[in-house]
Image (cartoon, rainbow, N blue to C red):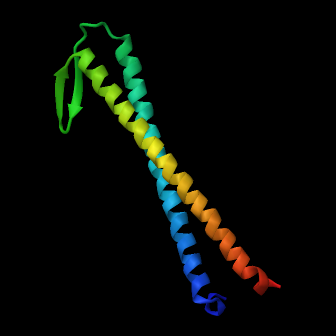
Amino acid sequence: MTAELPPQIQNQIAQLQQIQQQIQALAMQKSQVEAMQKESKMALDELGRLADDAVVYRNVGELVIKTSKEESITKLKDREETLSLRLQSISRQEERLTSRFKQLQEQIQQALGPRAQ
């Protein structure tokens, strides 16, 4: 069937498929960022339950470093903020791609409309 379609429509269909793949990749990224955000929140909650003078260790690469509760809280809050910004960015990209997907879909349907009859 695609052999009968004009090159422009074939190109639009290819773009549509590519956008769909990008949307799926963004959904996976979003899920990963949300999971990291949840981990950071859980860690912050746990730190909140500790005494102010508690000894805290954190992973840095393959090392485990002794640190203060305050420093750990600061780093986790920074991480949460970074993840939140990343999530907003992913959401904006998703919105743009979804909009472009719908636009292309409509163009293809309009172009194929007369052919289908």
The residue lying at 17 percent from left, 26 percent from top is 65
Which residue lies at the image location 52% right of the left edge and 58% below the top edge? 24
Q: Total marks drawn?
A: 0
Q: Residue 2: x, y in percent?
A: 63, 87
Say which quarter of the image contains residue 103.
bottom right
On screen, residue 85 above or below 6: above
Q: Where residue 6 appears, x then y in whole percent? A: 62, 89
Where residue 40 sits, quadrant-wise, is top left
* Nearer to me, 45 or 64: 45
Above or below residue 40? Residue 90 is below
The residue nearer to you, when weighing 4 against 55, is 4
Which residue is painted at 70% across and 80% down in the image? 111
Question: What percent of the width, then of the height, locates residue 48?
Answer: 37, 13
Determine the residue located farthest toward the right in the rendered image: 117
Relative placement, left or right, of 19 versus 4 is left
Position of 96 compared to 70: left or right? right
Q: Quadrant of the C terminus?
A: bottom right
Residue extending farthest to the bottom is 4
* Residue in the image at 19% along x and 20% along y: 67
Q: Quadrant of the N terminus?
A: bottom right
Image x and y of residue 14, in percent: 54, 77
Q: Nearer the viewer, residue 50 or 34?
A: 34
Q: In this view of the protein, which residue sits in the foreground, 75 or 108?
A: 108
Image position of 90 with respect to 65: above or below: below
